[in-house]
Image: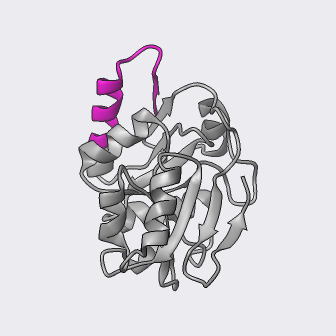
């Protein structure tokens, strides 16, 4: 497990290291404004399945996709209504996951049997730069064992995983320290699945 502290290395170096690992099918732990996340290239089936295994997470519990902008979100969704686009524009980047109907660009191994996908644009420069440099979204979840407390620091995240993580990036304590709010926009009247 490689460990990088953003106080000791440049953002450019951290981004480059993370992208190289993601492209080679690796798994990374990274900071966001909410909690630390665990992520892999969403186009790499083996890497995505590794997240489920590491977290001891059921394959029927979908991962979310982290995007760097609304343009990427549109490429993963069936037609987004003006109302949904307004929610994204008003709340991104930020601690809001928007559940939408997925299109054929989102593989079933990311979302299980569901025809929906949770999308989020985090308010953290590091992960946004990683996604931009990679060129497409990453599959992600909180960096904890399923059912355990989501980590607010890199050290807390690293303690959950004895092996299987290729890179941990320490960006200090997360500002919010709680998982994002989740809004399901696929039902009439929009459903709040998780409060912040």
Q: Position of residue 12 (x, y in %)?
A: 29, 26
- Side (left or right) of 133 relative to 158: left
Q: Which residue sits at x=43%, y=49%?
A: 27
150 shown above or below 192? above
Foreground residue among 169 and 3:
169
177 shown above or below 87? above
Foreground residue among 23 and 142:
142
Which residue is outermost to the top?
A: 8
Q: Position of residue 49 (x, y in %)?
A: 46, 67
Q: Which residue sits at x=60%, y=83%?
A: 187
* Residue 55, image quadrant: bottom right
Q: Position of residue 194 (x, y in %)?
A: 71, 63
Residue 163 seen anywhere in this rendered image of the structure:
no
Q: Which residue sits at x=54%, y=40%?
A: 32
Q: Position of residue 30 (x, y in %)?
A: 49, 39
Residue 177 seen anywhere in this rendered image of the structure:
yes
What is the magenta range? 1-20
Q: Which residue sits at x=29%, y=69%?
A: 75
- Side (left or right) of 56 relative to 129: right
Figure label count = 0
- Side (left or right) of 68 relative to 165: left
Q: Give the colouring mode of the picture.
A: one colour
Foreground residue among 163 and 115:
115
Q: Is residue 3 magenta?
A: yes
Q: Is residue 12 magenta?
A: yes
């Amino acid at each position: 497990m490689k460990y990088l502290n953003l106080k000791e290395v440049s953002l450019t170096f951290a981004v480059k290291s993370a992208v190289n690992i993601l492209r080679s099918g690796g798994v990374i732990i990274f900071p966001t404004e909410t909690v630390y996340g665990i992520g892999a290239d969403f186009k790499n089936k083996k890497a995505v399945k590794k997240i489920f295994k590491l977290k001891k997470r059921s394959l029927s519990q979908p991962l979310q996709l982290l995007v760097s902008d609304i343009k990427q979100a549109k490429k993963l969704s069936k037609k987004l209504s003006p109302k949904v686009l307004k929610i994204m524009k008003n709340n991104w980047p930020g601690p809001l996951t928007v559940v939408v109907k997925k299109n054929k660009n989102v593989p079933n191994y990311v979302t299980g049997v569901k025809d929906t996908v949770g999308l989020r644009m985090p308010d953290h420069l590091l992960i946004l730069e990683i996604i931009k440099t990679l060129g497409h979204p990453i599959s992600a979840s909180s960096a904890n064992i399923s059912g355990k407390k989501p980590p607010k620091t890199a050290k807390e995240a690293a303690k959950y995983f004895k092996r299987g993580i290729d890179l941990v990036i320490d960006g200090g304590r997360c500002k919010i320290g709680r998982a994002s709010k989740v809004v399901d926009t696929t039902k009439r009247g929009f459903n709040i699945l998780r409060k912040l």
